[in-house]
Image (tube, rainbow, N blue to C red):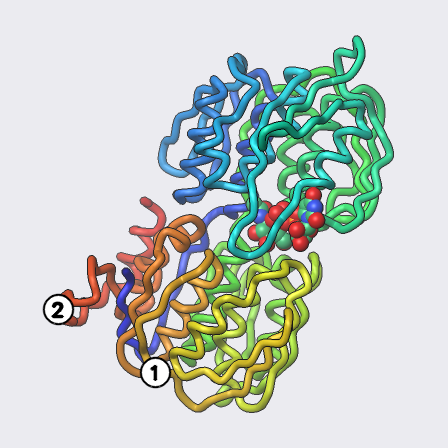
Amino acid sequence: MLRIWGRQPLKGQVKISGAKNSALVIMAGALLCPDDCRIRNVPSLVDVSRMGEILAALGVTIQRQGDTLEVNASHIGQSKAPYELVSQLRASFFVIGPLLARLGVARVPLPGGCAIGARPVDLHVRGLQAMGADVQIEHGTVHAYIKGNKQRLQGAKIYLDCPSVGATETLMMAATLAEGETIIENAAQEPEVVDLANFCRAMGAKIRGAGTNTITISGVPRLHSTDYSIIPDRIEAGTFLVAGAITHSEISLAPVIPEHLTAVIAKLHTIGAEVITEAPNRVRLVPGQHHRATDIKTMPFPGFPTDMQAQFMALLTLSEGNSVISETVFENRLRHVAELNRMGADITVKGNIAIIRGVPMLSGAPVVATDLRASAALVLAGLAAEGITTIQGLQHLDRGYENLEGKLQGLGAKLCRVESESEPASQPTTESPETANSTASKS
Ligand code: UD1
């Protein structure tokens, strides 16, 4: 459990880690390459370790040195990803594209539903079929192999019904080694898709248009070794910007790519906070005296990210006036509402719409995290609430935030992990920002 003593002002700088969603898909992408790949700026997260275990189970050699992964997929001994691991990590389904492209066959268990929605993989499957794969789903596993006597997947024109991040990534990876040209229309434009495209290009893939809604891939017979550094995590950065706003504190973040944060920064401006670009890769949050309500609709990039919806909701509970949040990307991503209400928020839900009436104060309470970003929202609410908040369900937080409590402690927050609710409630001492930064970079 995480225990937070609320209403401590924050101050200082925080180091932003490499992007979780880039790291996971780029690790899967390393399967495309028969030579050594070095991937830098990889965050230390439970999800990253699980993806490493999946690659190892497929026969890949993978070693971690600090924030760098050395991956060698010269010999892939297995075409079947193990169910016990895939069931714990949806992103592991992304190995299907590279496995099929490299081996001509892939067997990956369906990732199943998850807390935020059903999350089907039909777009991944239909795209692979268009590229000449026979795909059958039997006993909960997707069996895919290249049809006929062809050695390689075949380039195809694929239109995605919705700009799915995962489907775009699966099909882009599969197309790098296909015969001929693949065009993905209505492709996702998220920065992590661009990061994956850049990684594949660094291995010799021919990809144009990543970051727009049409991506064109000219297949090549083989990719080669590379040394690649992952972009900073825009969702971690956004979470820290909200931490500054909700505690009315001035904090700086680096490294960041401000263009990846445009929608989040625009909403912070609307509610009355300022985000100043101090250097090309550094921003500073200057909170407003009073924050105002605003309406938010989650959308694919460059729209407002669904992965920041819960954190912004925590902020809007304390903003003056009524806000409306519409979650349009996932069908069940408002489960944090009940927990925020336990802390004194005034939120009602109608379908996928949350109506938030700003309150002057939240009060600390025992709460349960239901998914990754929901747990971040509860941490943020706990930082702003009067009294003590205890958050259960930290396994979600550890999946996606590198050393969140160390980084917050470095900014002056008072929080620590406890084994149980009954542990003595003495406040931890605060680390200096310097200590926190070095803790963050070591982990
Ligand atoms: C990725 C991110 C996740 C983020 C999401 C949306 C990773 C590891 N995860 O998830 O953090 O919240 O993008 O920005 O990168 N869909 C289908 N059929 C499919 C695929 C998707 O109907 O075959 C639907 C999903 O159910 C969802 C919507 O499309 O409603 C968007 O999902 P998608 O963009 O694919 O998200 P993920 O790649 O799973």
Residue 165 in view (yes/no): no
Q: Residue type at mark 2: give it.
A: Pro
Q: Quadrant of the C terminus?
A: top left
Residue placed most toward the observer, 284 or 181: 181
**In terms of secondary structure, where does tag 2 sit?**
loop
The percent position of residue 63, horizontal first and vertical second, equals 39, 26
How many numbered marks are there? Answer: 2
Q: In the image, is residue 341 above or below residue 142?
A: below
Is 180 placed left or right of 360 in the picture? right
Q: Amino acid at mark 1?
A: Ser
Q: Are marks 1 and 2 in contact (CB under 8 Å)?
A: no
- Judge whether 50 appears above or below 388 on screen: above
Q: Nearer the viewer, residue 362 or 36?
A: 362
Q: What is the distance, in whole Å, between disc 1 and disc 2 at their CAs?
A: 19 Å
The local crowd at label 2, few if under 14, some if 14 to 19, many if 20 or more residues have their Cα within 10 Å, is few
Question: Image point 43% across, 34% down: which residue?
Answer: 68
Residue 247 falls left or right of residue 308: left
Judging by the rendered image, the residue that carries numbered circle 2 is: 424
Tell me the residue that label 1 is attached to: 363
Q: Residue at x 45, y 33 (%)?
A: 85
Percent coordinates x, y for residue 314 in the rendering? 48, 74
Whether residue 337 can be seen here: yes
Dot placed on the residue nearer the N-terminal end, 1 or 2: 1
Above or below, comparing residue 229 to residue 385 in the picture = above
